[in-house]
Image: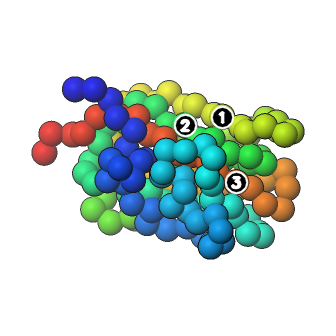
Amino acid sequence: MRAADWCLSSAGAALVLATSSDERHPAENVADGSSETFWTTTGMFPQELIVGFPARVRISRVAIQCSQVRTLRIERSVSKDPVGFEECIEKDLQHTEGQLQMEEFSLPDFQATYLRFIIKSAFDHFVSVHRVMAEGTAENT
C-alpha cells in the first residue's frame, strides 16, 4: 500500500484543536496541502495544534513547514479521543530569516490517531505554520 499524507483534509484529517485563532489565517490552512496558506499564532507560547486522522495510521515520517518557530515538540495519541499523548520528538529549529523552515522527522513506524504539534517557543511574537505532514499507511482494523 502506498504511503499517504494523513494530515491533509482531503485524506480525512480534522483539525481538532488550535490554541489561537485568526480568521484571516485559520488553523485549517495547515491541512489544505498548500504552502501559500498558513495558520498564525497570536501572542503567548506555548501554542498547539492537534490533527485527528480518520482511522489509526502507521506513520513513518512527520514534517512541518513553518516560520519563526524556535522549539517544537510533536506528540501522538492512539486513543479514540485526543487524550493520553506521548512525546515523539522535541527539537530546537534553526532560525531562517526570510524563508520557511522545513523540518522532517523520520520516525520508527508508530501508530497514531492524533498528532499534537506544540510550539514551545519562537524567534518572534508570532509564528506561522504553513503545512504539517504525516506520511504513512492505514492500519488494517
Q: Is residue 97 above or below residue 116?
A: above
- Assess disc 3: are there few (<14), some (14-19) or many (≥20) residues with their C-alpha within 10 Å of its C-alpha: many
For numbered disc 2, what is the local secondary structure? strand
Looking at numbered disc 1 in the image, what kind of residue is underneath it?
Met
- Please give the name of the residue rendered at 63% of the width and 34% of the height, measured from the top-left corner: 103
Q: Which residue is mark 1?
A: 102
Work out whether residue 125 can be spotted. yes
Quick check: 65 left or right of 49? right
The answer to which image quadrant residue 141 occupies is: top left
Mark 1 or mark 3, earlier in chain = 1
The answer to which image quadrant residue 34 occupies is: top right
Mark 2 or mark 3, earlier in chain = 2
Look at the image and tell me in which quarter the N terminus lies.
Answer: top left
Looking at numbered disc 2 in the image, what kind of residue is underneath it?
Ala
Q: Which residue is mark 2?
A: 63
For numbered disc 3, what is the local secondary structure? strand
Which disc, if any, is residue 128? 3
Marks 1 and 2: in contact by CB < 8 Å?
Answer: yes
- Assess disc 1: are there few (<14), some (14-19) or many (≥20) residues with their C-alpha within 10 Å of its C-alpha: some
Label 2, label 3: how far apart the Cα atoms are? 14 Å
- Please give the name of the residue rendered at 49% of the width and 44% of the height, measured from the top-left corner: 33
